[in-house]
Image (cartoon, helix red, strand yellow):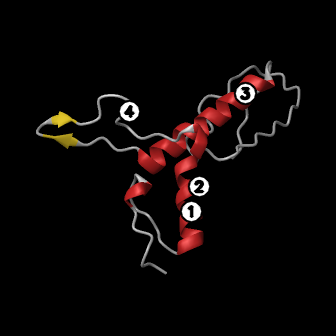
Amino acid sequence: MSGTAGHVVNPGIVEAQIQSGIIYGLSAALYGEITIKNGRVEQNNFDQYEVVRLADAPKIEVYLALSGGKKWGGIGEIGTAPTAPAVANAIFAATGVRSRSLPLKNVKLIGHA
Protein backbone atom coordinates (compact mmCIF):
# COMPACT_ATOMS: atom_id res chain seq x y z
CA MET A 1 0.00 0.00 0.00
CA SER A 2 1.29 3.44 -0.73
CA GLY A 3 0.15 7.00 -0.42
CA THR A 4 1.42 10.54 -0.39
CA ALA A 5 1.12 12.55 2.81
CA GLY A 6 3.14 15.58 1.86
CA HIS A 7 5.49 16.97 4.52
CA VAL A 8 5.46 14.65 7.56
CA VAL A 9 5.91 16.41 10.90
CA ASN A 10 5.69 13.36 13.17
CA PRO A 11 6.52 10.03 11.47
CA GLY A 12 5.40 8.10 14.58
CA ILE A 13 1.87 9.44 14.27
CA VAL A 14 1.78 8.56 10.57
CA GLU A 15 2.94 5.02 11.39
CA ALA A 16 0.23 4.69 14.07
CA GLN A 17 -2.44 5.96 11.65
CA ILE A 18 -1.44 3.43 9.00
CA GLN A 19 -1.37 0.56 11.53
CA SER A 20 -4.75 1.47 13.02
CA GLY A 21 -6.25 1.90 9.55
CA ILE A 22 -5.12 -1.59 8.57
CA ILE A 23 -6.58 -3.09 11.77
CA TYR A 24 -9.85 -1.23 11.14
CA GLY A 25 -9.88 -2.49 7.54
CA LEU A 26 -9.12 -6.06 8.64
CA SER A 27 -11.92 -5.93 11.21
CA ALA A 28 -14.39 -4.74 8.59
CA ALA A 29 -13.25 -7.24 5.95
CA LEU A 30 -13.11 -10.28 8.21
CA TYR A 31 -15.93 -9.70 10.68
CA GLY A 32 -17.86 -6.53 9.80
CA GLU A 33 -21.45 -7.63 9.93
CA ILE A 34 -24.50 -6.12 11.60
CA THR A 35 -27.40 -8.52 12.03
CA ILE A 36 -31.06 -7.74 12.64
CA LYS A 37 -33.40 -9.93 14.68
CA ASN A 38 -37.06 -9.06 15.30
CA GLY A 39 -36.46 -5.62 13.79
CA ARG A 40 -33.58 -4.75 16.12
CA VAL A 41 -29.82 -4.67 15.73
CA GLU A 42 -28.30 -7.58 17.64
CA GLN A 43 -24.90 -5.98 18.27
CA ASN A 44 -25.21 -3.34 20.98
CA ASN A 45 -21.54 -2.84 21.80
CA PHE A 46 -18.05 -4.12 20.97
CA ASP A 47 -18.48 -7.18 23.19
CA GLN A 48 -21.05 -8.33 20.60
CA TYR A 49 -19.30 -6.97 17.49
CA GLU A 50 -16.19 -8.89 16.53
CA VAL A 51 -13.04 -6.92 15.74
CA VAL A 52 -9.39 -7.87 15.29
CA ARG A 53 -7.92 -8.06 18.79
CA LEU A 54 -4.30 -7.41 19.65
CA ALA A 55 -3.56 -11.11 20.17
CA ASP A 56 -4.82 -11.87 16.63
CA ALA A 57 -3.35 -8.83 14.87
CA PRO A 58 -0.62 -9.38 12.32
CA LYS A 59 2.72 -7.66 12.57
CA ILE A 60 2.40 -4.45 10.58
CA GLU A 61 5.53 -2.77 9.30
CA VAL A 62 5.27 0.78 8.01
CA TYR A 63 8.06 2.32 5.96
CA LEU A 64 8.08 6.03 5.21
CA ALA A 65 10.05 7.56 2.39
CA LEU A 66 10.62 11.01 3.84
CA SER A 67 11.21 13.35 0.95
CA GLY A 68 11.01 16.68 2.74
CA GLY A 69 8.12 17.65 0.48
CA LYS A 70 6.99 21.24 0.32
CA LYS A 71 3.26 20.52 0.55
CA TRP A 72 1.52 20.04 3.88
CA GLY A 73 -0.99 17.27 4.05
CA GLY A 74 -2.33 14.39 6.01
CA ILE A 75 -2.31 10.64 5.73
CA GLY A 76 -6.02 10.08 6.33
CA GLU A 77 -7.37 6.55 5.93
CA ILE A 78 -4.87 5.27 3.36
CA GLY A 79 -4.38 2.06 5.38
CA THR A 80 -8.08 1.16 5.52
CA ALA A 81 -9.36 1.16 1.93
CA PRO A 82 -6.95 -1.33 0.30
CA THR A 83 -7.03 -3.83 3.17
CA ALA A 84 -10.16 -5.83 2.22
CA PRO A 85 -9.13 -6.27 -1.44
CA ALA A 86 -5.61 -7.28 -0.36
CA VAL A 87 -6.94 -9.94 2.04
CA ALA A 88 -9.49 -11.22 -0.50
CA ASN A 89 -6.76 -11.50 -3.14
CA ALA A 90 -4.48 -13.33 -0.69
CA ILE A 91 -7.29 -15.80 0.06
CA PHE A 92 -7.79 -16.34 -3.66
CA ALA A 93 -4.07 -16.86 -4.22
CA ALA A 94 -3.88 -19.39 -1.39
CA THR A 95 -7.15 -21.27 -1.97
CA GLY A 96 -8.47 -20.48 -5.42
CA VAL A 97 -11.70 -19.25 -3.78
CA ARG A 98 -12.84 -15.84 -5.00
CA SER A 99 -15.00 -14.00 -2.47
CA ARG A 100 -17.73 -11.79 -3.88
CA SER A 101 -19.08 -10.53 -0.55
CA LEU A 102 -18.00 -9.42 2.89
CA PRO A 103 -17.40 -10.23 5.68
CA LEU A 104 -14.87 -12.86 4.78
CA LYS A 105 -15.75 -14.91 7.88
CA ASN A 106 -18.76 -16.15 5.88
CA VAL A 107 -16.69 -17.41 2.93
CA LYS A 108 -16.51 -21.20 2.73
CA LEU A 109 -12.88 -22.10 2.09
CA ILE A 110 -12.96 -25.82 2.89
CA GLY A 111 -13.98 -28.06 0.05
CA HIS A 112 -12.78 -25.65 -2.62
CA ALA A 113 -9.64 -26.13 -4.65
Q: Earlier in the sequence, mark 3 or mark 2?
A: 3
Kindly state the secondary structure of the residue where label 1 is placed: helix
Q: Are marks 2 and 1 in contact (CB under 8 Å)?
A: yes
The residue indicated by pointer 4 is: 47
Q: Earlier in the sequence, mark 3 or mark 1?
A: 3
| 19 left or right, relative to 81 | right
Structural crowding at the residue carrying mark 3, measured as other residues with C-alpha within 10 Å and reported as few (<14), some (14–19) or many (≥20): some
Q: CA distance from mark 4 to mark 3?
A: 29 Å
| 36 left or right, relative to 33 | left
Q: Earlier in the sequence, mark 4 or mark 2?
A: 4
The residue indicated by pointer 3 is: 14
Q: CA distance from mark 3 to mark 2?
A: 21 Å
Residue drawn 34% across and 28% down?
45
Residue drawn 40% across and 53% down?
102
The residue indicated by pointer 1 is: 89
Front disc: 4 or 3: 4
Instruction: Give percent across and percent down for residue 46.
Output: 39, 31
For the residue pair 14 and 7, the one nearer the viewer reads as: 14
Q: Amino acid at mark 2?
A: Ala
Structural crowding at the residue carrying mark 2, measured as other residues with C-alpha within 10 Å and reported as few (<14), some (14–19) or many (≥20): some
Q: Which mark is residue 86?
A: 2
Q: Amino acid at mark 1?
A: Asn
For the residue pair 47 and 42, the one nearer the viewer reads as: 47
